[in-house]
Image (cartoon, coloured by chain):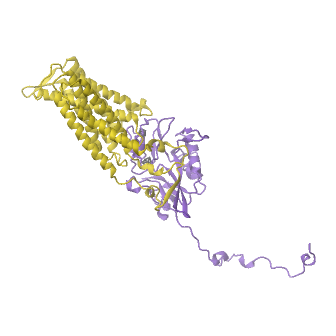
């Protein structure tokens, strides 16, 4: 497949935004449960605000993918059958709930709803935040299933795709959270950086698994079954178009093996190895290290998503054996 | 339930592209139009087509055959392109099984083209919506056309009658009979999309001619016995002159 740039930005930006939100919201619960110390300045509102902005940027990027962005609202119609439609519902829902949470937190106008047990206060923000967690999880699944459900794109049609989207999104989100918490000195550094390392390494393992799975896939459909002529020796003479067609432009990439190898090594290094090394610095280190860790990871994940598209081989390519 | 479809005879297709051009002509001026044509007369012509003819050489020289292979949307009975569409712009009509795109609803997200394993869908670069073969829905029910013309235009234009149109769920239709009698098959059957369009394979066309067929021995009205008039035995002008 030809990589679709806007989709690459959409999936990586919302992944990081979702991960960042999950990082800060989970930290808030750990504070309430007295596992993490309470912070003097609570940054969760601002972190959620940033997460909202990431999701918004992703949403805007996605519009560039559409031929008719003004009709995008129609895409919510077929949620019963289409994962894309489900994503179109889950994304604004997550954005709305995260925004409510962020605004309540930032303005300090939160109010208590009830006490859970003796000493866990459940406020409106906590409830909205919990709704946002559900929406974020649904969004992760929907986004990944858009690709994983296409059974003819064999490289995508695997549970590994879903695990990868979730793990990479969370990993980049926790790395970003680490950077924020170094800056804010809110006592959540150890939790965030530890989780970021854990998630990045898990993502690496799962991505590696999908890379090796894709190396050993059952072949694409043969020309024999594509045109129904059962002869071992078939050569295409013409593809039915002279100056190319949508079929040759949308599904066939022309990158050489060396570019692909460079991209693969690049994303493994920038997206996983470099951030894990930089995350070893302690909380006292400059925030710059963690900002670089996130930047490197984000660029690495952009390259990873690009490669994810390149990797997928559309079965229709069998009809375009040569250009004439 | 009706399932309209095309049956394409690879044995008779000569690859003349009459179906391609007539399809473009009909549809670019009809409800699906206009269909883009970039550089139509220049070096790299490209554009939107619902139907394309590809050519393949089968065998190794000198024992080869050229197979011309017309390719368009197969109107799958279990179309993978339909459920993925987020807007409902892509749909399969329950009454006749034709898979269509509603150009007013389509947002041009291209997701359906990822899902179709045959590459039968194309984004129209001007209108930015997904287009594909409509099986000439704007023709086949048109009461203002004479009955024999209520067929997809590619079927009417094919000079070798390589394209048969009909309801493949009706065992009495010409299309079903062709599938049953001539070994009609589906493309990439392993995907389970159940394409409605079928293809008829190449067959050996060989006739043994017997003398009695030529003589029409069993025909009471036969004229062979009379033969040409017997040559004259009388002297003619040719015998006495040399010019
Ligand atoms: S051939 Fe492709 S576009 Fe046509 S119905 Fe089948 S899957 Fe859909
Ligand atoms: S391109 Fe149009 S028809 Fe295809 S999935 Fe998107 S909205 Fe549906």
**Image location (x, y in percent) of residue A144:** 31, 40
* Chain drawn yellow in the picture: A
Numbered label tally? 0
Q: Residue at x 32, y 38 (%)?
A: A267
Where is A14 relative to B227, above or below? above
Answer with the quarter of the image where residue A264 lies: top left
Please identify the quarter of the rendering in which residue A177 is found: top left
Quarter holding residue A193: top left
On screen, B174 above or below A186? below
Residue B27 visible in the shown view: yes
Which percent across, then down, holds residue A129?
Answer: 21, 28
Q: Closer to the camera, A265 or A114?
A: A265
Give the farthest residue toward the right: B241
Give coordinates of residue A132: x percent, y percent: 24, 30
Give residue A93's position: percent from left, percent from top.
28, 30
Extreme residue in the left direction: A118
The residue at 22%/37% (across/down) is A199
Q: Is residue B148 visible?
A: no
Q: Is residue A290 left or right of residue A115?
A: right
Left or right of A124, for residue A310: right
User: What residue appears at the point 58 percent right and 71 percent down from the top-left corner?
Assistant: B207
Q: Residue at left 56%, top 40%?
A: B28
Chain B on-screen colour = purple
Nearer-the-camera pick, A275 or B134: A275
Q: Please identify the quadrant where the N terminus of chain A is shown.
A: top left
């Amino acid at each position: 497949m030809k990589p679709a740039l806007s989709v690459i930005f959409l999936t990586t930006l919302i992944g990081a935004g979702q991960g960042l939100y999950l990082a800060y919201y989970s930290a808030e619960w750990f504070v309430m449960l007295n596992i993490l110390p309470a912070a003097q300045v609570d940054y969760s509102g601002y972190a959620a605000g940033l997460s909202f902005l990431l999701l918004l940027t992703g949403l805007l990027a996605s519009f560039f993918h559409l031929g008719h962005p003004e009709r995008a609202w129609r895409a919510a119609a077929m949620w019963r059958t289409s994962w894309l439609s489900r994503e179109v519902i889950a994304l604004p829902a997550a954005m709305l709930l995260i925004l409510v949470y962020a605004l309540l937190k930032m303005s300090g106008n939160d109010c208590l709803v009830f006490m859970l047990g003796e000493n866990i206060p459940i406020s409106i923000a906590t409830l909205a935040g919990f709704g946002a967690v559900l929406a974020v999880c649904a969004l992760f699944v929907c986004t990944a299933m858009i690709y994983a459900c296409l059974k003819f794109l064999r490289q995508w049609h695997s549970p590994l795709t879903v695990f990868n989207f979730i793990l990479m999104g969370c990993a980049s989100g926790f790395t970003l959270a680490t950077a924020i918490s170094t800056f804010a000195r809110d006592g959540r550094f150890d939790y965030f950086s530890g989780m970021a390392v854990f998630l990045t390494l898990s993502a690496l393992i799962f991505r590696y698994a999908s890379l090796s799975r894709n190396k050993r896939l059952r072949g694409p459909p043969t020309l024999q079954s594509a045109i129904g002529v059962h002869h071992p020796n078939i050569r295409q003479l013409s593809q039915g178009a002279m100056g190319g067609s949508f079929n040759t432009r949308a599904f066939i990439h022309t990158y050489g093996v060396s570019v692909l190898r460079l991209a693969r090594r690049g994303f493994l290094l920038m997206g996983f190895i470099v951030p894990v090394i930089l995350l070893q610095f302690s909380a006292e280190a400059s925030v710059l290290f963690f900002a670089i860790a996130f930047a490197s990871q984000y660029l690495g994940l952009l390259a990873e998503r690009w490669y994810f598209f390149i990797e997928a081989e559309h079965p229709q390519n069998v009809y375009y054996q040569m250009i004439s | 339930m009706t399932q309209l479809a095309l049956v394409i005879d690879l044995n008779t297709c000569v690859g003349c592209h009459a179906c391609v051009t007539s399809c473009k002509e009909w549809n670019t001026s009809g409800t699906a139009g206009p269909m883009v044509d970039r550089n139509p007369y220049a070096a790299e012509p490209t554009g939107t087509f619902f139907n394309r003819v590809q050519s393949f050489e089968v065998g190794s020289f000198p024992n080869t055959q050229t197979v011309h292979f017309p390719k368009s949307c197969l109107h799958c009975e279990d179309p993978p392109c339909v459920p993925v569409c987020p807007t409902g712009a892509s749909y399969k009509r329950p009454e006749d099984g034709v898979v269509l795109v509603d150009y007013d609803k389509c947002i041009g997200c291209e997701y359906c083209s990822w899902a179709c394993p045959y590459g039968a869908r194309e984004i129209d670069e001007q209108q930015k919506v997904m287009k594909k073969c409509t099986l000439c829905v704007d023709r086949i029910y048109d009461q203002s056309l004479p009955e024999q013309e209520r067929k997809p235009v590619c079927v009417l234009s094919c000079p070798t009658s390589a394209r048969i149109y009909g309801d493949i769920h009706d065992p009495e239709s010409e299309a079903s009979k062709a599938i049953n009698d001539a070994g009609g098959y589906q493309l990439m059957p392993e995907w389970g999309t159940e394409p409605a369009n079928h293809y008829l394979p190449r067959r050996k066309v060989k006739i043994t001619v017997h003398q009695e067929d030529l003589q029409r021995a069993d025909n009471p009205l036969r004229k062979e016995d009379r033969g040409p008039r017997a040559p004259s035995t009388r002297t003619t002008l040719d015998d006495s002159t040399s010019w």
